[in-house]
Amino acid sequence: RMESVEDLVVVPGDRIGLSADIQAGPGCYVSGTQVYASSVGVVEVTEVQGNEKYKQAQVVRIQSRRAPVVPTTDSIVIAKVQSINARQAKVSILSVNDSPCHEPFPALIRVQDVRPVFTDSVQIIESFRPGDFVRAAVINLGDSRAYLLTTARDDLGVVFATREGVTMGIVDANTMQCPRTLASEPRKVALVA
Amino acid sequence: PSFLANLFSHMQPWRFEGGTPVDFIRKPRGGGSDSMNDRKINSLRPVFISMGTVAKASGSAYIEIDGMNLLCSVHGPRPDSKADFVSEVGRISCDVRIAPFAGVHSEPEREKELALLIRPALEPAVVLSRFPKSVVEIHILVLEEEGDVVAAAISCASLALADAEIEMFDLVAASSVVHSHGSSEMQVDPATSDRVKQIASITTAMMPSRGEVTQISHAGEWDPEQLEAAMRLSIAACRQMHSMMRKALLDGAQSSRLQEHAA
């Protein structure tokens, strides 16, 4: 029965199987005792870790043009810094988990969420500047105007910054340097192992 | 014209070729509307569906039903600037424009009224929890008006949402039934000529796979028994419309798949 639904092209509302047999993955939903498709595409059945009999079904769009992309809690985003003040940096989310957004989502990084340990000495001006691209994690949906992000991890922070049009290189976790003028600027740098 | 052929050459335009228990009477394009004498009361007119027509939109669908041309484009999910409070679920917004050349004089009030009829029919079908704090904008452009706009627009918008990869519990198919002067019978999928003398009409939008009706709107005076008969007729017509919509989506997906395998 599992084999018969694999590779089947479905539209929203088509029944895929029993919820006792299949876990609903992306593109599927559960209603009552059945799993239904919620997207147009082809059904892919994959193994569920740690469970031999239970399988997961997902509906994968064939030739997906632009799948809907929305920031969710704990997703990793790339955002561009629009403006800063003493309390926070206002950013625009450009991509979520490596999928580009149709339109940028407004977000902000508060000063207490910039570094792993917050002390009075943490300053936004020494962490981000307008025009920087940062990798951040979504804390939660924030308020009606902006998502709430954090860079309080070693692998989060500025990934790309320029100084007078020249791309800066990374010196250490707190410094970036212009290769031409050798001038250093403080940043909260994302260190990817 | 050849430029039109180039415009549509990358898509698989889909035309219903028959094969259902219900009769379809074909009329040449531009021939105007069917009269009640020529068409059975429970038959839908031929439908042409084309998906992905608007390249810049997240998703789009174009529908032609014998003189009615509708284009629906979907944008989103987009950040919702109009929200006052944080919402764990998204919302959909609907905007209707009737083109100046659509053949019918239309005021902005009518466009707003149409949008108010279309949005609630679609909302229950969209999985709003997948795009919190965001809005999916549905734009409907009526290029040529004939018959019932609302029913065609709802079906078209549902296809456009599917094309935009917005998750839905089910497709929404809509259909209307009209009871006219001088006839004891009702007509499904009315043409403008059927509506000119109408006493009453009912438009139903439903999610056929789930068997749930999302909206019923009715105008005029119905006898209670007639109303029930009209609703059943309308729901049956919705199911027919749904099978055509479903076939259009599946054919599109299959041809994409063939393209993918060929590439």
Image: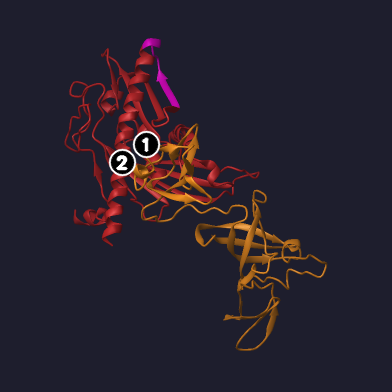
Residue B195, image x and y in percent? 31, 24
Residue B200 visible to the viewer = no
**Would you name the residue on which mark 2 appears?**
B63
Q: Secondary structure at mark 2?
A: strand
The verdict on residue B222 being magenta is yes
How much space separates mark 1 and mark 2, taking CA atoms?
A: 9 Å
Q: Which residues are magenta?
A: B215-225
| Residue B43: quadrant of the picture | top left
**Would you name the residue on which mark 1 appears?**
B155
Residue at 81% over, 66% down: A119
Q: Amino acid at mark 2?
A: Ile
Q: Amino acid at mark 1?
A: Ser
| Residue A123: quadrant of the picture | bottom right
Which chain wears orange?
A
User: Do tag 1 and tag 2 residues touch (Cβ < 8 Å)?
Assistant: yes
Q: Residues within 10 Å of mark 1 (few under 14, many from 20)?
A: many
Tell me: A93 left or right of A120: left
Chain for numbered disc 2: B
Residue at 58% over, 80% down: A167
